[in-house]
Amino acid sequence: MLEITDLTVRRKSFTLENITANIKPHSLTVILGKNGSGKSTLISAIDQSVNYEGTIKYLNKDLKTLTERERATIVSIMPQHLKSPPFSVNDLVSFGRNPYLDFAGRLNKLDVERINYALETTGAVNYKNKLVTQVSGGEKQLAYLAMALCQDARIMVLDEPTAFLDVDKENEFLNVLKNEVKTHKKTAIITMHNVTQALRYADSVMILNNGKLEFFGSKENAVSSGVIERIFNVTHSMVNGINVYLAK
């Protein structure tokens, strides 16, 4: 379980304040919120890339006290803005194994197995020899997902990973992620804008609003509470058993 307790991040013009949430293991939690609500700030705190007050623990281990290598075996981060380095997709995915390599940086049999698994699972195997600079935006996002899978951390944290994908690619991406949670008992935390899509895939929902936690719980309770309509100014309906939210 990832335990976030009294988390506060103070920035010049924004404060993420007193966030407390226990993320259940082997589940997919979606963080929702308008632009500027604090979603990426929360991800940065989990990533230990910003200063914060409060604690973030995994199995009672404070992430602040761990080395970068130790944290990388627990938490993998897929940032919102993905770089396009001038090397192959295969090499990019391989970087996910860095926390496990010996001093010589050699890949062992398990490393190669995890790389191949990640490439096959995401479909990135079809363009693994292309440079990252040569693939499409959707292919690049799947390549970075493959790197996160390859890292084999217990918790996967992804910041707006489907923001620039069309519907088909978004579903493909989220299906891969959901399968990883269910089949390999990973924990996923993902920020999203699309409320309808979020509720299709989420187990739990966290809603941030102006730096404060408005809701944290099951997606069923998120729907029944009316908090989504209130925060996002949308209407709710059921279409073929799917919760659909549309702007008023």
Image: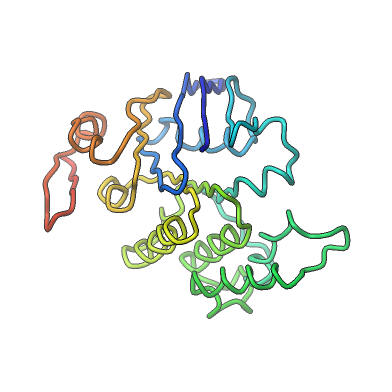
Image quadrant for the C terminus? top left
Relative to 123, does residue 196 appear above or below in the rendering? Answer: above
Residue, x 59% and y 31% (percent of image)? 57
Residue 94 in the image, given as x and y percentages of width and height: 68, 66
Q: Work out whether residue 76 or residue 58 is closer to the camera in this orientation and state it.
A: 58
Quarter of the image holding residue 165?
bottom left
**Residue drawn 38% across and 46% down?**
192
Which one is in front, 165 or 5?
A: 5
Residue occupying image coordinates x 38% and y 66%: 172
Give the residue at x 23% y 40%.
Answer: 220
The x and y percentages for residue 125 are 55, 77
86 over 230 or under it: above or below: below
Instruction: Name the side, left or right, on which 40 lies relative to 87.
Output: left
Can residue 41 be seen in this snapshot? no
Q: Quadrant of residue 115?
A: bottom right
Is residue 247 among what the camera can see? yes
What percent of the width, then of the height, locates residue 211? Answer: 43, 24
As drawn, which residue projects farthest toward the right? 104
Up-down: is 69 above or below 4?
A: below
